[in-house]
Image (tube, grey):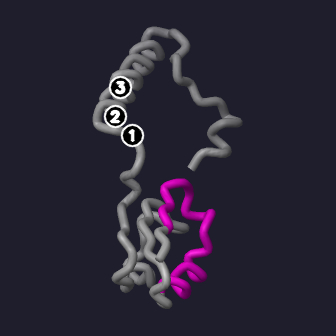
Amino acid sequence: GALLINTARGGVIDEQALIQELKKKRFKAVLDVYEEEPLPLESGLRDLSNVILIPHMGGPTIDMRQYMTIGALRDIDKVLHGKKPEHMITKEQLKIMT
């Protein structure tokens, strides 16, 4: 059997089609992202024994989370002191982010 892992975006997989295929028990899945987050209680994914559901936790390590927190605090300090933050997100970038 195969294993499908999705940590990218929920919308890249048709969840209803995925549920139908998973019911056939030909493969397993680990999902960290969903079409709708948080995953609705009535989602058919919750009824399947061959799926591991993770609540959007994939990504940075503990060390990276600490680095990101320090970076965010530094940027907040810069903004509060009238300076441009290092990790500023433009309107164009924001439009394509989830």
Q: Residue 58 at x, y = what percent?
A: 40, 51
Relative placement, left or right, of 11 versus 40 is right
Q: Are marks 3 and 2 in contact (CB under 8 Å)?
A: yes
Q: Are marks 2 and 1 in contact (CB under 8 Å)?
A: yes
- Residue shown at 53% from the left, 23% from the top: 87
Residue located beneath label 1 in the image: 60
How many numbered marks does the figure carry?
3
> Which segment is the magenta one?
4-22
The type of residue carrying mark 3 is: Tyr
Per the model, the C-alpha gap separating discs 2 and 1 is 6 Å
Q: Residue 83 at x, y = what percent?
A: 52, 9
The type of residue carrying mark 2 is: Arg
- For the residue pair 98 and 59, the one nearer the viewer reads as 59
Label located before the other in sequence (1 or 3)? 1
For residue 6, above or below residue 26: above
Q: For residue 64: magenta?
A: no
Relative placement, left or right, of 23 versus 63 is right
- Residue shown at 43% from the left, 79% from the top: 45
- For the residue pair 12 and 78, the one nearer the viewer reads as 12
Per the model, the C-alpha gap separating discs 3 and 2 is 5 Å
Residue furthest to the right: 92
Residue located beneath label 3 in the image: 67
What crowding class fits label 2: few (fewer than 14 Cα within 10 Å), some (14-19), or many (20 or more)?
few
Disc 2 element: helix
Q: For residue 5: magenta?
A: yes
